[in-house]
Image: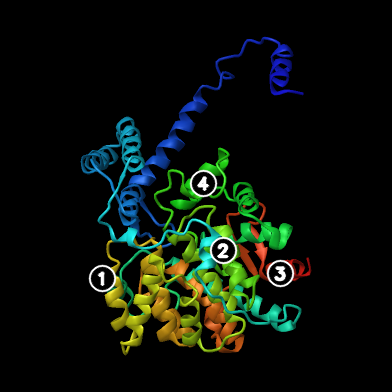
């Protein structure tokens, strides 16, 4: 039946009724408007759910576009008026100014003087693959060792996420003022954050399609499983909802496409490609382009390769160097992780290496991939295989701590094993993982481990 026939059948079967005032449902429009108002307010001023850190995502959008080598003009007065409207709860004006500000972002012009353009722009996996020489190890996914490593990898990801969620969005100096040196959870830990959310969606797609999974498969799982996102992921969900699929879902009207959202979910791609960083990178590219672009996707590849090689490596510093060498040297992302590595090699402690990174990437939002990639490098280098010290460093560096800690601790947990992890980190958790993913609100970690292991084994059999 054609669409017009369906609609004609509907109208022809409709019998007129007279609704009472209570039945007319116009009051619901006000409720819808209130939800919309609340969403707009969040763009102009909100606090991170886990840590209370302040953020203004719409202003950070301007920052993100300028980071990507564009000039945004005429926004200063709009921002001033918007903040006044927010303060006065003038929603009529705030909605209008929000539209105006995003319009300015959409009509931005290229800044020919920006250093961004001296680096190669990677738009496809083929471009990336051609510029990199990958290492590859053999690893037995049918072994008991694999099952144990996946379990401890997931547990370590929860540890890192829980520690970081409470302190993300702050600077080293301000964290130290309040907490001193962070060497334990600053509050009772929990598993609720957005770090694991998108990894579960990837895993569901991978379970169904294995190595044949593509970005559209992943996008379909996103829109089915994930009720909401933030910054790049929220834009991508909106795009997918209206039929804009990858890679356009990651770029269309998305100023946040080089932020940390893809980088925070690379671990799962490494977990299902143990010892095979090229395959981990390929899967990360497919996943990353659902919501990100160029350096944003490379950030996910970085973490995917870290976790992939953690199955076959013991020396954290050598692992880090190997992974950085598999980032294309023509990319701006490479310049970031290489700069951080250079600081490590000439410094005697983590803070001496971190401070130049903190200064160099100050113009990037704390949710951008770059300062967080640098934080990962410094924490891994000076943690040097010590689980407690690595957590201490990644927490003290600040910025997007939960995303950073969840990723690198997945790799480190796989490397060191459960015997090198103090009970204080894992004991607060039972086997249950709480999420806000539809149909996966409560997941047993042993079942998640089994799901991950079987998905990987089945993919390799296919």
Residue under label 2: 284
- Name the mark nearer the viewer: 2 or 1: 2
Instruction: Evaluate if marks 4 and 2 touch, with contact meaning CB atoms under 8 Å apart.
Output: no
Q: How many marks?
A: 4
- Mark 4 or 2 closer to N-term? 4
- Mark 1 or 4 closer to N-term? 4
Quadrant holding the C terminus: bottom right
Q: CA distance from mark 4 to mark 2?
A: 16 Å
- Mark 2 or 1 closer to N-term? 2
Across and down, in percent, residue 118 comes to: 33, 62
Residue under label 1: 359
Q: CA distance from mark 3 to mark 1?
A: 41 Å
Question: Can residue 189 be seen in this snapshot?
Answer: no
Q: CA distance from mark 1 to mark 4?
A: 33 Å
Q: Is residue 446 above or below residue 47?
A: below
Foreground residue among 54 and 18: 54
Q: Secondary structure at mark 3?
A: helix
Using a 10 Å C-alpha cutoff, classify the residue at mark 4 as few (fewer than 14 neighbours), some (14 to 19) or many (20 or more).
some
Across and down, in percent, residue 3 comes to: 69, 23
Residue under label 3: 456
Residue under label 4: 248
- Name the mark nearer the viewer: 1 or 4: 4
Quadrant holding the N terminus: top right
- At 43% from the left edge and 51% from the top edge, which residue is drawn? 231
């Amino acid at each position: 039946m054609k669409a017009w026939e369906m609609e004609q059948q509907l109208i022809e079967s409709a019998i007129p009724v007279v609704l009472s005032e209570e039945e007319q449902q116009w009051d619901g429009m006000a409720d819808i408007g209130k939800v919309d108002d609340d969403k707009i307010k969040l763009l102009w001023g909100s606090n991170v759910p886990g840590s209370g850190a302040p953020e203004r995502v719409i202003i950070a959008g301007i920052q993100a576009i300028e980071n990507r080598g564009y000039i945004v003009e005429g926004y200063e007065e709009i921002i001033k008026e918007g903040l006044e409207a927010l303060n006065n709860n003038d929603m009529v004006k705030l909605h209008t100014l929000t539209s105006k500000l995003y319009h300015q972002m959409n009509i931005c012009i290229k800044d020919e003087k920006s250093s961004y353009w001296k680096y190669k722009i990677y738009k496809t996996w083929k471009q990336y693959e051609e510029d990199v020489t990958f290492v590859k190890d053999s690893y037995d996914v049918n072994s008991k060792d694999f099952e144990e490593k996946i379990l401890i990898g997931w547990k370590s990801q929860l540890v890192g996420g829980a520690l970081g969620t409470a302190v993300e969005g702050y600077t080293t100096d301000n964290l130290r003022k309040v907490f001193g040196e962070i060497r334990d959870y600053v509050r009772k830990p929990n598993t609720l954050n957005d770090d694991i959310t998108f990894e579960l969606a990837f895993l569901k797609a991978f379970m169904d399609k294995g190595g044949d999974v593509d970005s559209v498969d992943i996008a379909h799982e996103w829109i089915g499983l994930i009720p909401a996102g933030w910054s790049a992921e929220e834009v991508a969900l909106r795009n997918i909802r209206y039929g804009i699929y990858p890679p356009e879902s990651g770029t269309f009207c998305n100023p946040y496409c080089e932020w940390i959202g893809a980088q925070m979910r690379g671990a799962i791609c490494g977990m299902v490609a143990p010892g095979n960083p090229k395959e981990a990178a390929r899967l990360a590219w497919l996943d990353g382009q659902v919501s990100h672009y160029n350096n944003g996707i490379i950030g996910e590849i970085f973490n995917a390769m870290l976790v992939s090689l953690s199955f076959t490596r013991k020396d954290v510093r050598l692992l880090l160097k190997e992974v950085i060498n598999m980032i294309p040297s023509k990319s701006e992302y490479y310049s970031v992780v290489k700069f951080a590595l250079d600081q490590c090699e000439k410094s005697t402690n983590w803070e001496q290496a971190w401070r130049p990174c903190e200064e160099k990437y100050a113009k990037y939002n704390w949710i951008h991939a770059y300062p967080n990639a640098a934080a990962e490098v410094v924490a891994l280098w000076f943690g040097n295989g010590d689980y407690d010290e690595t957590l201490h460093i990644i927490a003290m560096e600040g910025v997007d701590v939960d995303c950073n800690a969840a990723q690198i601790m997945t790799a480190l947990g796989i490397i060191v094993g459960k015997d090198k992890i103090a009970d204080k980190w894992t004991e607060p958790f039972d086997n249950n993982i709480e999420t806000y993913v539809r149909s996966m609100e409560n997941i047993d970690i042993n079942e998640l481990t089994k799901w991950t292991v079987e998905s990987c084994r089945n993919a390799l059999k296919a």
